[in-house]
Image: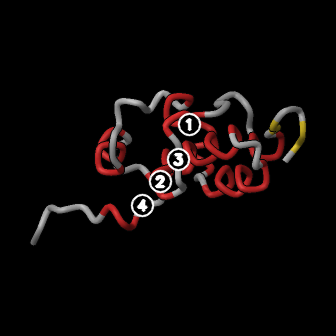
Amino acid sequence: MSDTIDITKYETIFDHNITKEELEHAYITFKRSKEEYLKDVKYNQDRCYCDLYDLYTHRKDYATAKKYFYMQSEKYIKEHYNPYEDDFKSSIEINGVLI
């Protein structure tokens, strides 16, 4: 049995034509490949979706950002966006617009 992780099963910012400028905006300049990125986020798909949400928010593509926001698990959202609000998904806003 192999301990090799199939990185193709993870959807990341590196699958979405991220630019050098976008990497710098996301403070991901030290991650030069999908493999390095996945190691850094400990192969956590929720974290990958979070970064995709941030990427598309930065691109002002709010419909796609919303898609990746809702792909994250409820547990991850509560732990990483606003742990004090019971139903954070119902009140998430992007630039003042309820999504």
Above or below for 72 versus 24 = below
**SS type, badge 4:** loop
> Circle 4 sits on which residue?
10
Dot 1 alpha-carbon crowd within 10 angstroms: few under 14, some 14 to 19, many 20 or more = some
39 or 85: which is nearer to us? 39
Q: Confirm or deny contact between disc 2 and disc 3 (CB under 8 A).
A: no
* Identity, as a three-letter code, of the amino acid under mark 2: Thr
Residue 84 figure quarter: top right
Q: Confirm or deny contact between disc 3 and disc 4 (CB under 8 A).
A: no
Pointer 2 or 1: first along the chain: 2
Pointer 2 or 3: first along the chain: 2
> Circle 1 sits on which residue?
22
Q: Which mark is residue 12?
A: 2
- Please indicate whether residue 79 sits to the left or right of residue 85 in the image: left
Pointer 3 or 4: first along the chain: 4
**SS type, badge 3:** loop
Query: Looking at the rendering, in which quadrant would you find the N terminus?
Result: bottom left
Residue drawn where x is 89% and y is 33% of the image: 96
The span from disc 4 to disc 1 (Cα, nearest Å) is 20 Å
* Identity, as a three-letter code, of the amino acid under mark 1: Glu
- Please indicate whether residue 86 sits to the left or right of residue 35 in the image: right
> Circle 3 sits on which residue?
18
**SS type, badge 1:** helix
